[in-house]
Image: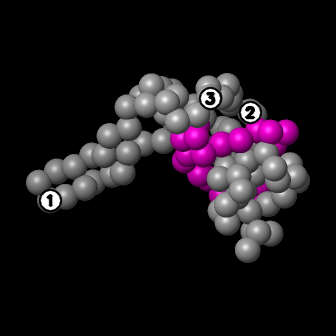
Amino acid sequence: MGQSDKEPTKNFSTGDSVIAFAGSEREISGVIVEDFGEFTPTAVESADGRIADPARRWAVTTDDGQLLFVDTGDLSSPTSSAAPSSGKGDKKK
């Protein structure tokens, strides 16, 4: 709901090829492997401090084997990104 205010709705699904963090130094391509669904991200805290940061919507396995947890706003379709779909994040400096 809050995310839809900052950008148009994107329709991603498990198995889609995506680019995470397009146009930034962190840009990297991969495939969505899990959809955790819509939720209101909330950190988990206790009297001792923060236990966990807010959860993310998507799990993405990158082309170089990393596992990322990202929100919809962090993703672009390879065809809609300014970067080539075969590009990897480690090529950008």
Residue 15 appearing in the image:
yes
Asked if marks 3 and 1 touch (Cβ < 8 Å), the reply is: no
> Which element is circle 3 on?
loop
Q: Which residues are magenta?
A: 62-80
Horizontal and vertical percent for residue 68? 59, 51
* Residue 65 magenta-highlighted: yes
> Which element is circle 2 on?
loop
- Residue drawn at x 75%, y 34% is 16
Q: Amino acid at mark 3?
A: Pro
Query: Badge 3: how crowded within 10 Å, few (<14), some, or many (20+)?
Result: few
- Outermost residue on the left side: it is 47
Residue identified by numbered label 1: 48
- Residue drawn at x 16%, y 51% is 46
Residue identified by numbered label 2: 15
Which quadrant of the figure has residue 65?
bottom right
Calculate the distance from the C-alpha at mark 3 to the C-alpha at mark 1.
Answer: 38 Å
Mark in front: 2 vs 3: 3
Which quadrant of the figure has residue 78?
top right
- Residue drawn at x 67%, y 66% is 25
- Residue drawn at x 73%, y 74% is 93
- Residue 50 is left or right of residue 22, and the answer is left
First in sequence, mark 1 or 2: give its number.
2
Horizontal and vertical percent for residue 62? 71, 53
Asked if marks 2 and 3 touch (Cβ < 8 Å), the reply is: no
Q: Is residue 15 above or below residue 59?
A: above
- Residue 29 is left or right of residue 48, and the answer is right
- Residue 74 is left or right of residue 38, and the answer is right
Q: Amino acid at mark 2?
A: Gly
